[in-house]
Image: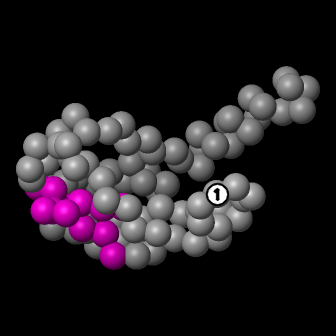
Amino acid sequence: MLPDGSDVRSDLQSTNATRSELFEREVTLVEAAPDSPGIEGYWPDIDGLTHRESVTDETIALSAPKGSFFDYAVANVLTTNTLNRLRGALSPRSL
């Protein structure tokens, strides 16, 4: 569900455009994993990190069956509403 309450379904022609607009970058939903799957990793400016204040490309899912991410990893999606509720739960009074 999107912030405006509308749903995005994978079987709609507009899905890629809707997600691209939401994430402000090109997004494509595909049925099979690419031959060399990867993700972009953001490294914040924190002492001790290998990279600081940069984005790197990371190879993933090397042990997953070819052409799939099946049972490879958990995906967590956090919404603004969830983050706001967590902020409220972790107020200075509760620490």
**Image mark count:** 1
Q: In the image shown, does 81 or 54 lie closer to the viewer?
A: 54
Residue 26 as seen in the image, left or right of residue 81: left
* Kind of residue at badge 1: Leu
Question: With respect to residue 68, does 15 lie above or below?
Answer: below
- Which residue shows up at 78% across the image and 31% down it? 90
Give the residues in magenta: 26-39
Residue 34 as seen in the image, left or right of residue 81: left
Quarter occupied by residue 31? bottom left
Which quarter of the rendered picture does the C terminus lie within? top right
Secondary structure that dominates the magenta span:
loop
Residue 84 percent location from the top left of the image: 68, 43
Q: In the image shown, does 52 or 91 lie closer to the viewer?
A: 52
Label 1 packing within 10 angstroms: few (<14), some (14-19), many (20+): few
Tell me how the rendering is colored.
Answer: one colour
Residue 17 percent location from the top left of the image: 29, 73
- Which residue shows up at 37% across the image and 42% down it? 75
Residue 13 as seen in the image, left or right of residue 23: left
- The residue pinned by badge 1 equals 49
Residue 10 percent location from the top left of the image: 19, 54
Does the image show residue 32? Answer: yes
Q: Residue furthest right?
A: 93
Q: In the image shown, does 52 or 32 lie closer to the viewer?
A: 52
Magenta stretch holds residue 59: no
